[in-house]
Amino acid sequence: MDETPERLTAKPSWLITQLAVHARRLVFDGFAAAGARGYHYRVLAALHEFGPASQAEIGRRCRIDRSDVVAAVNELVEQGFADRTPDPDHGRRNRVTLTGDGLRQLRRMDGVLDQVQDDLLKSLSAEERQTLTRLLGRVLAQHEPE
């Protein structure tokens, strides 16, 4: 293995970036094997947790660009994982709803992500994983827009 300069390995930003690249690859490969994409998981998770929503609401909650939300919702509707119907309260807006098949797909994807977490963090104990998650959440929260 090539040696990495200590100036890099001593910087949390460098370590986080390297780990993010690895995590992204694991998630992409796992979801691809399940016939899904990361945006699908975000949308399905938001629909499950918050209920039916407009595409704009989904985009804000999931931090997905508007055009990417449209593409993801189109794919989910085509696969029968979501329904899109006109919003009775707003003529130009659609409401997106999770279907039973969508809930089953979300659960499959949860399993994929659970396996990714295990692969990614196998060198950490359960307590260390909780601590890492808490610390990363705290650091991320300080950079969130208010």
Image: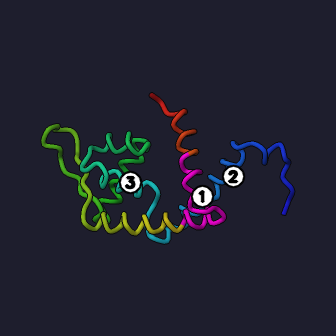
Q: Residue at x 31, y 52 (%)?
A: 49
Q: Is residue 42 magenta?
A: no
Q: Which of pointers 2 and 1 lies earlier in the amino acid sequence?
A: 2
Residue to which mark 3 is pinned? 72
Dominant secondary-structure state across the stretch colored magenta: helix
Secondary structure type for disc 3? helix
Horizontal side of 103 relative to 29 (left or right) equals left
Of tags 1 and 3, which is closer to the observer? Answer: 1
Of the numbered discs in the image, which one, if any, rests on residue 18?
Answer: 2
- Report the magenta residues as a range: 116-134
Question: How many C-alpha atoms fall within 10 Å of the one at disc 1: few (<14), some, or many (≥20)?
Answer: some
What is the quadrant of the N terminus in the image? bottom right
Residue 124 position (above or below residue 92):
below
Q: Is residue 126 magenta?
A: yes
Question: How many C-alpha atoms fall within 10 Å of the one at disc 2: few (<14), some, or many (≥20)?
Answer: few
Q: Position of residue 14 (x, y in %)?
A: 72, 45
- As measured in the structure, the alpha-carbon distance from the residue carrying label 2 to the one carrying label 3 is 27 Å
Q: Residue at x 32, y 41 (%)?
A: 57
Of tags 2 and 3, which is closer to the observer? Answer: 2
Residue 93 position (above or below residue 107):
above
Three-letter code, disc 2: Gln
